[in-house]
Amino acid sequence: MATQGVKRKLSAILSADVEGYSRLMGEDEEATVRTLTTYREIMSSLIVQYRGRVVDSPGDNVLAEFTSVVDAVQCAVEIQQVLKARNAALPENRRMEFRIGVNLGDVIEEGDRIYGDGVNIAARIEGLAEGGGICISGSSYEQIKNKLALGYEYLGEHAVKNIVEPVRVYRAQIEPAAKRAEKRVGLRWRWAVLALVIIGAGAVVIWNFFLPPVRSTVEPASIEKMAFPLPDKPSIAVLPFDNLSGDPEQGYFCDGMTEDLITDLSKVSGIFVIARKSTFGYKGKPVKIKQVAEELGVRYVLEGSVRKVGEKVRINAQLIDATTGHHLWGDRYDGKLGDVFSLQDKITQKIVAALAVKLTPGEKKHVARRETDNIAAYDAFLQGWEHYLRLTADDFAKAVPYFEKAVELDPNYGRAYAALALTYLISARNYLIWPPKINVSRGECYLLARECLEMSMKNPTSLSYHVAADMMLYRRQHGEAIVAAERAIALDPNDATGQFIMGKVLVFGGRPEAAVEYVKRAMRLDPHYPAEPLCLLGLAHFAMGKLEEAVSSIERGLKHNPELVHFTVPLAAAYAHLGRDKEAQDAVETRKAGWMLPNLRTIMYNWPFKDLKVSDHFVDGLIKAGWLGKPSEYYRVSEEDRLTGEEIRALVFGRKVAGLDGLIDRTKDGKASCRGSRVSASIAGAPMGVAPVASDSGRSWIEGDMLCDQWQTRFQGHKLCYPVFRNPEGTREMFNEYLTITDFGIISWSPVD
């Protein structure tokens, strides 16, 4: 007979705790608590993204519930990958590794709490996992074994306290279970691993014995003359491959091949790879290997050529140890155009082997993963990317059709969708500077960027996460932006852009001290283009209150690239606080540059500091520098004032609201109507890109902690989602008690019924 008042259900339970937590607390209690707090925020964000909920988090434990065991295990894998990337930046003795157990079982629900055997088994399985690892129960395994691309190692049956039958346990084969996974990799990788072990035992001696290096006329580089110290891992610069096709129009294909090799090598954590921008600075120039190595601070240089004639492709490549002048490896690869991905894989594997770098099982899979198998889609993407990299309005307009063709040929091409999103996003942000050439409005550029990003996330690449992190940041979703940036680095640890984006979201996310190392790493990976990282470093110093350092760094950045005019804004604020009034006023005039200065409300949308003390200090500096306005005129958006999904639902569904968006009436079931209102005409500050208010109908719903609308005609029918914040300083009379933060600005409104 069922017990009265007891509700039971089947749930997927994730249980996690920190391995060696007592040791970490004993060595440095304060640092451990900081790291634990940060990691919990990351885990909580990922749990929500995978449709789960955090049930409890006492001490170093986290208990979460999911309706799907597939979601639970995918979330566990994502957590371990993101935390691994975070731990890589910490000293080894300060790394915090979680053990995770997942079980599918019966639980008792009491309010927001859950109890019972299902929870107990998850906790027991968690204790069998290694730090950074995942164990799952037999019931979980039966549900996911053919649904997820993971390996599983059977650990036998284990007794659980108060459970009659022993529980079958499996280890999900992600890191740190790397050594076990190596036993089941393919035959060709067994030989590769064996070769790497031999090379690791006597790298140069054995290599020279079996494959004597070709003595060449390459002049050795001097380590003492290198612009930067050599990294503590094999370092390489990949020079642009020469186009030997006899057709200058095929240059995009050679450049794309080079960039893909850089990208593939960048995925290997055991190699330091110079960014594309810095190596492509040598394109078409008669440079020596010695010069390249000394200017970029690397030991190895890869050079080569591509000949593409009809459907035939020939690739020549050679790897040079610049410190000795010796050729470590060289080869020629012939094939059909359709074989180009296989040829790229072979070259990457040869380089990795020559550098005696050991790939983890995850890296083997990731390096070999191709974003498309459609060679026509790949070719279209490369042509679009060539135009995108020129960063002009004309070239962006030319890039869009190529990217659209790529996704038409392969609807699952995540990188092409991400490139489209980035093209639209940059076009929107430069709308006043560039003459519009894409034939869509600024507002629609933002909406198309968001839609393309959503499509890209079905098969995400590091570029997808770069765009996601940047767009989340301006919507004041600081925690989500940091998680997205961490995912980008996990996919591509050598990408300078990924390091820069992480630095950017940390500066604005209230952690400028942590941002500094990421920004410096971005500069080291891309040493020929330090301007923007230097300016961002200056912004980090401003956020830390180090104004002299802020001025020095931003001035250096602007000297490298005077076109980064937007950084004259923090420079003006820093000058003003230092009492350098004339320089502050000059910086404001430089920012103005013939344009009317935006008001404080508009300008501060573009400087999304989470820490309101930094925002206030920033605004005070601008006013001292001569910027028109009062501190009270800008919206002080605080994380504490952000509404949850349920709070948004209770606030707007079944009610009328009025503001810059007009008068909107939403029913309880999500039907929505909108009509023009004098309110919008009477309040200044409507974000540019918002179409004139007109009568319309549509629907509204909640996604996570965001309000979503889709109208029949407004915003060209695009879906629009945004977080909602309380405005403690708002009033009903000004229709600004609440704020929705979109990709193109802040919209204020108030309930009116």
Image (cartoon, rainbow, N blue to C red):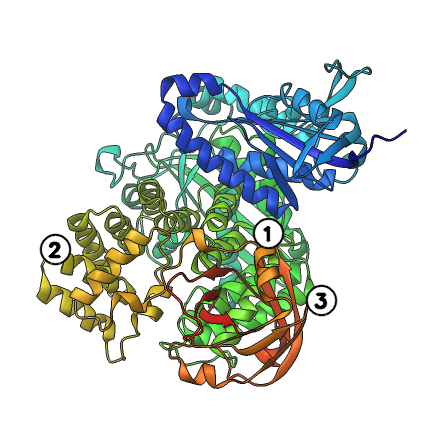
Residue at 55 percent of width and 38 percent of height:
43
Residue 590 coordinates in the image, percent (x, y): 20, 71
* Residue 183 in picture, x, y percent from top left: 68, 22
Q: Give the farthest residue toward the right.
A: 1
Which is in the foreground here, disc 2 or disc 3?
A: 3
Across and down, in percent, residue 533 comes to 31, 52
Are the residues flagged by discs 2 and 3 in contact, CB closer than 8 Å?
A: no
- Nearer the observer, 658 or 179: 658
Residue at the spot of label 1: 460
Give whichever of discs 3 and 1 has the lower sequence position: 1
Q: Which mark is residue 578?
A: 2
Upstream in the sequence, badge 2 or badge 3? 2
- The answer to whether the residues at label 1 and label 2 have Cβ atoms under 8 Å apart is no
Label 2, label 3: how far apart the Cα atoms are? 56 Å
* Mark sitting on residue 669: 3
Q: Amino acid at mark 1?
A: Pro
**From where the camera sits, is residue 88 visible?**
no
Q: CA distance from mark 1 to mark 2?
A: 45 Å
Image height of 48 relative to 676, above or below = above
Say which amino acid is labelled 3.
Answer: Asp
Kindly indicate whether the residue at mark 1 contacts the one at mark 3 (C-beta within 8 angstroms): no
**Dot label at residue 732:** none
- The extreme front residue here reads 4
Q: Secondary structure at mark 2?
A: loop
Q: Nearer the viewer, residue 688 or 356?
A: 688
Q: For this view, does 191 lie left or right of residue 422?
A: right
> Which of label 1 and label 2 is nearer to you?
2
Q: Secondary structure at mark 1?
A: loop
